[in-house]
Amino acid sequence: MSASAMVEVKSVRKSFGPLEVLRGIDLDVQAGEVTVVLGPSGSGKSTLLRTINHLEKVDSGWISVDGSLVGYRRSGDKLYELREREVLRQRTQIGFVFQNFNLFPHLTVLENVTEAPLSALKRPRDQVAATARRLLDRVGLADKADAYPKQLSGGQQQRVAIARALALEPKLLLFDEPTSALDPELVGEVLDVIKDLAHQGTTMIVVTHEIGFAREVADTVVFMDEGRIVERGTPAEVLDAPREERTRAFLSKVL
Amino acid sequence: MSSDTLSKAAAPAPPAAADVPRIVPQRRTGQWIAAAVVLALLGLAVNSVLRNDAFQWDVVAEYFTTSSVLRGLGLTLWLTALVMALGFALGTLLAVMRLSANPVLQAVSWGYVWLFRSMPILVQLLFWFNIGALYPQILGVKTVDLFGPVTVAIIGLTLHEAAYAAEVVRGGILSVDRGQIEAAQALGLGRHRRWRKIVLPQAMRAIVPPAGNMLIGTLKGTSIVSVIAVQDLLYSVQLVYHRTYQVIPLLLVATIWYVVVTSLLSVGQHYVERHYARGTGR
């Protein structure tokens, strides 16, 4: 629990019916740091990411982002669930990029990027459109502003989704397997955009299977299995000299 | 992109024209014979309709635009529009209730759809028409004064319509990918904005075709109100043929009007569908 932690996750538990997918998670992420979460399918890594912006509610424990509790208000020894309006306001500070992009298919690329700043932040339209075009330029898609998502490749769609998340100027970016739905030759263009953001000091948590990306970009690598954090450390520690047998077994399969 | 790859792959070795045998499509003699037989039968049918004086096409023409028929048509049109609007408003509410997390609202919505889909519309109209037997007075007013034929028609048709509309709207909402709602939530869009800007426009693609079906069904279905003496298109022509006994030509007047309006609505549906297909690449 450091004073400058951007994200703190404390004793978080979460079950879906009889299945406990998070079994007491503790994690903190410093501002400006890139944390990569690795682990086999069903290890709970996506669920953990989704609890950080309250897309999933936790059963116990708490999460804070930039010093404020996510989804709850503390009073004494109780946590009271916030109203949806307040949760939505918190989410505008946390960008989320989905595995399946989840772009709005009936809106153009530009409208996808401008929707949230217009309606959630109530910014003026001219300013929002100018910012959106700058962001599209940054992800290399300035010429696609008026296209519809279906007209783009998967890699281009995911870059739009990243621009859409950035449009809210979030303090934190969460990536849920951002390249898993992409054809192999399109993975690189998306990872390049994420690396670029990392080099500019954006705080982010990335759930991925891309070990090479973790080695190159991560400040911290976290390995999860069966709802627990098995091991965490620098890429060199976790990827090259894992202490835990389960980490070694996983890496031997994916490397 | 894929076409780029294909043309690049094909480019190095274009096949020499002389080596490639020409493709000859299969001869489909059977199809030609079938088409000829069907056209011949159709011709016979049209011929008999036009030559049979009992159809009395002159009477059809005489009554087609008389003021009583046009008034009936007007009533049919506004009754259809009103019933569709009210039915879909109530139906959307029922669909949202059914999809809500509240078990009481879910059950009420389910019960409504169950009840009003189970009851024949004719039974329902007669029921509302005789509601005075159950409640002779409502708020100090005599029920028979409150529930005139047109009011009964609006109430009965709307309640019936809403039960079907609820299922059409619910199907449309369910067709929208769950990830769309999550993306909107992750971006901090409020509940109202999520519905209006993200869910409903996408749901409309699945709603419009069955809603078009319902609109046309309702247009013709309103003719049932003739049993409670509401002067719609059908009842207007009935009033005439009860006087003149020219039953067939006057039913043709009504039929042709129904066909004309249905055709216009079908054209309209095409454009509405095209609007909501934006961005789907189809």
Image: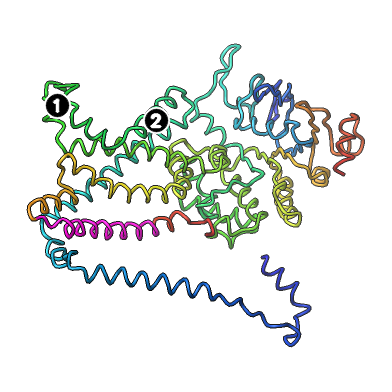
Q: Which amino acid does label 1 sit on?
A: Thr
Q: Mark 1 lies on which chain?
A: B
Residue in the image at 78% along x and 42% along y: A209
**Which stretch appears magenta?**
B245-271
Residue in the image at 43% along x and 22% along y: B104
Which residue is disc 1 drawn over? B143
Image location (x, y in percent) of residue A65: 64, 30
- State the residue lying farthest toward the left: B243
Residue in the image at 43% along x and 37% along y: B192
Q: How crowded is mark 1: few (under 14 residues within 10 Å), some or many (20 or more)?
A: some
Task: Please say if B46 is above or below B141.
Answer: below
Image location (x, y in percent) of residue B80: 26, 47
Image location (x, y in percent) of residue B176: 52, 43
Which residue is disc 2 drawn over? B114
Depth check: A190 or B276 in front?
B276
B37 left or right of B120 in image: right
Confirm whether the magenta stretch covers residue B184: no
